[in-house]
Amino acid sequence: MEKKDILILAIESSCDETAASVVKNGRWVLSNVISSQIALHTQYGGVVPEIASRKHIENINGVIEEALAEARVTLDDLDAIGVTYGPGLVGALLVGVAEAKAIAFAKKKPLVGVHHIEGHISANYIENKELEPPFICLVVSGGHTHLVVVNGYGDYKVIGRTRDDAAGEAFDKVARAIGLGYPGGPKIDRLSKEGNKDAVRFPIAKVNDAPLDFSFSGLKSAVLNHINMCQMKNIEINPADIAASFQKSVVDVLVSHSMEACSMYGMKKFAIAGGVASNSAIGEAFSGECLKRNIEFYHPSPVYCTDNAAMIGAAAYYEYIKGVRHGYDLNAVPGLKLGERI
Ligand code: KG4
Ligand code: ZN
């Protein structure tokens, strides 16, 4: 008998993207619909949680209808509903969780809650059908900077984390300081190409007792101090040079810690994930370093780096086949830890 395909409808609403996707057997994306609210939040210089929740509730049914239509399936064809239930903005998460529960309840389908970071890591499975754990993954997003040993599906060990700002947060704050606006990451990425990355030497803090941990708040302050110093001395600042020099500092520390982690754990497979992973300088730097060390390097396309529901569908599949099911009392857990089950 031929093995039946597993179809999962996945929903993601943890921050400012309302997203739905139909994923087959964890790695084949039949549809991936993303309704971004970026334009709406740009005028406030960042994500306004209350506005995000209201936009999610307005858009979610339309996004799901589109995802089903594009995949040419109906709710009846689905094997399970996967949904991000944390971490993230509570009001935003609640919209996706309530929607997933309503569909699961009405259609009597299993409900699988997914950790958002587990989703980011699983984005790597979509375009790398051969990738299997164990591997090390660097997760760099707007809210998280984690070095993770992926021992198996759903089996994670966090071996490094940020002590203060996330990498994406640093990009966003520095972008604001040099007048680029929100979201900062892609704008710094673009502007850096016109700048000299050796123009300004920004320090990067080492965390003494934890060689794999990160700290970005000092770097952010150094950039702000540099700008203030230039203004006081009437020196014209060059935003492209600042962007490129800042980006170089971030890339250097991400690469050195990640390569250190690979050698500490004797790992020959390394992946990156999260919005910041779509940064072009980060991609280039890791490709080169991994090649030098004979490490296989995996990274999702930009659309699977930033928030999307296909990655949630990939993660949900591996939870589903392990037998993970959530009850109709599933709640949003804004501070959910990786590897924690609720
Ligand atoms: O993963 P994501 O979409 O949302 C979270 O889970 O946080 O990541 C968003 C973050 C933002 O901070 C954004 O500035 C950053 O990813 N980002 C980038 C780039 N594209 C998005 N950072 C650097 N370079 C990029 N090309
Ligand atoms: Zn994310």
Image (cartoon, grey):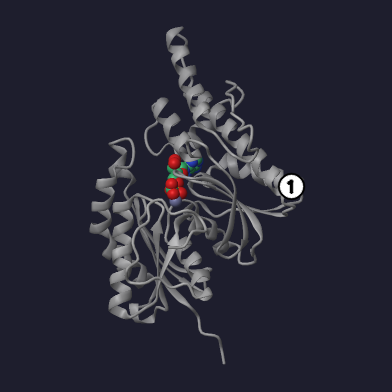
* Mark 1 residue type: Ser
Residue at 50% over, 69% down = 319
Q: Quadrant of the N terminus?
A: bottom right
- Judging depth in this view, the residue of 116 and 323 nearest the camera is 323
Q: How far across and down, in percent of the image, does residue 326 sit?
A: 40, 70
Q: Is residue 197 above or below residue 309?
A: above
Residue at 59% over, 29% down = 205
Q: How far across and down, in percent of the image, does residue 141 sit?
A: 48, 45
Q: Quadrant of residue 228?
A: top left
The kind of secondary structure element at disc 1 is helix
Residue at 55% over, 55% down = 300
Q: Which residue is mark 1?
A: 263
Q: Quadrant of the C terminus?
A: bottom left
Q: Is residue 294 above or below residue 329?
A: above
Q: How far across and down, in percent of the image, does residue 185 sit?
A: 46, 38
Q: How far across and down, in percent of the image, does residue 265 sit?
A: 72, 51
- Judging depth in this view, the residue of 207 and 65 nearest the camera is 207
| In this picture, residue 92 sits left or right of residue 216 | left
Q: Residue furthest bottom?
A: 1
Q: Is residue 188 above or below residue 178?
A: below
Residue at 52% over, 37% down = 163
